[in-house]
């Protein structure tokens, strides 16, 4: 029924989050028949991005250089480190426009039931990154896992003698940072409380 090449494309498309068999079929048809130029550009863009984009060694955001623009910005305070769960959260905080420190992206949260422990989350690398940090601000989501993650990192930082605070004000329980507007996030950062 299908060509092997089409089967392969289907399979590849279905690896994308939220893409089921029907959508994969539609997307494949679109790329091959309606917009082959777009398909070629998409393929090239993915290959190129996979080739040049890496994790920044300072914050683990995506970057084309060993250190990203945020980590290289001399106007930012090295003593302040804001921990977020994912890149969307970093962008949300950044768009709020009030954060003057550095970042650390966890790329996840502690979730023992799913096998995500401190090691899988790379918390040893975070510990190493804490040298020279005065205050660690935990901006993980206010979900159960986000709170557990914040609690664990807080313990770790306190053992290293670093002040730890948690964003709180304005962030609803069970809230995901990336869904908040800039003003709420600004308040959440300004109103952070020391743990
Ligand atoms: Zn960086």
Image: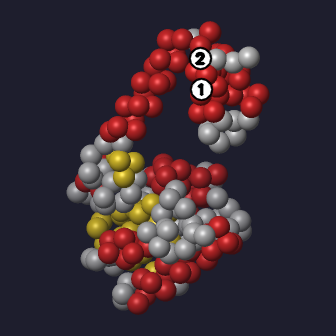
Q: Nearer the viewer, residue 180 or 2?
A: 2
- On the image, the x and y values in percent for residue 39 come to 52, 18
Residue 9's disc number = 1
Q: Nearer the viewer, residue 41 or 13?
A: 13
**Mark 2 falls on what kind of element?**
helix
Can residue 186 be seen in the rendering of this structure? no
Q: Residues within 10 Å of mark 2 (few under 14, many from 20)?
A: some
Name the image colouring: secondary structure
Ligand 1 lies under 8 Å from the Cβ of mark 2: no
* Residue 132 as seen in the image, left or right of residue 143: left
Can residue 76 be seen in the rendering of this structure? yes
Looking at the image, residue 139 lies above or below residue 37: below
- On the image, the x and y values in percent for residue 55 come to 36, 52
Q: Residue at x 59, y 26 (%)?
A: 9
Instruction: Tell me, yes or no, whether the two marked residues, 1 and 2, touch with CB atoms within 8 Å.
Output: yes
Q: Residues within 10 Å of mark 1 (few under 14, many from 20)?
A: some
């Amino acid at each position: 029924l299908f060509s092997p090449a089409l089967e392969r494309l289907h399979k590849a498309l279905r690896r994308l989050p939220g893409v089921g068999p029907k959508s994969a079929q539609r997307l494949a048809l679109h790329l091959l028949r309606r917009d082959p130029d777009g398909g070629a550009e998409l393929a090239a863009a993915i290959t190129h991005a996979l080739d040049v984009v890496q994790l920044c060694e300072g914050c683990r955001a995506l970057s084309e250089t060993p250190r990203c623009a945020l980590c290289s910005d001399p106007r930012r305070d090295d003593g302040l480190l804001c921990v977020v769960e994912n890149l969307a959260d970093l962008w949300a905080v950044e768009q709020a426009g009030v954060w003057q420190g550095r970042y650390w992206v966890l790329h996840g949260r502690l979730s023992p039931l799913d096998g995500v422990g401190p090691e899988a989350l790379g918390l040893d690398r975070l510990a190493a990154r804490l040298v020279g940090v005065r205050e660690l601000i935990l901006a993980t989501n206010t979900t159960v896992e986000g709170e557990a993650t914040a609690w664990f990192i807080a313990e770790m930082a306190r053992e290293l003698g670093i002040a730890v605070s948690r964003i709180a004000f304005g962030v609803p329980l069970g809230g995901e940072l990336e869904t908040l507007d800039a003003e709420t996030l600004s308040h959440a950062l300004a109103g952070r409380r020391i743990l």
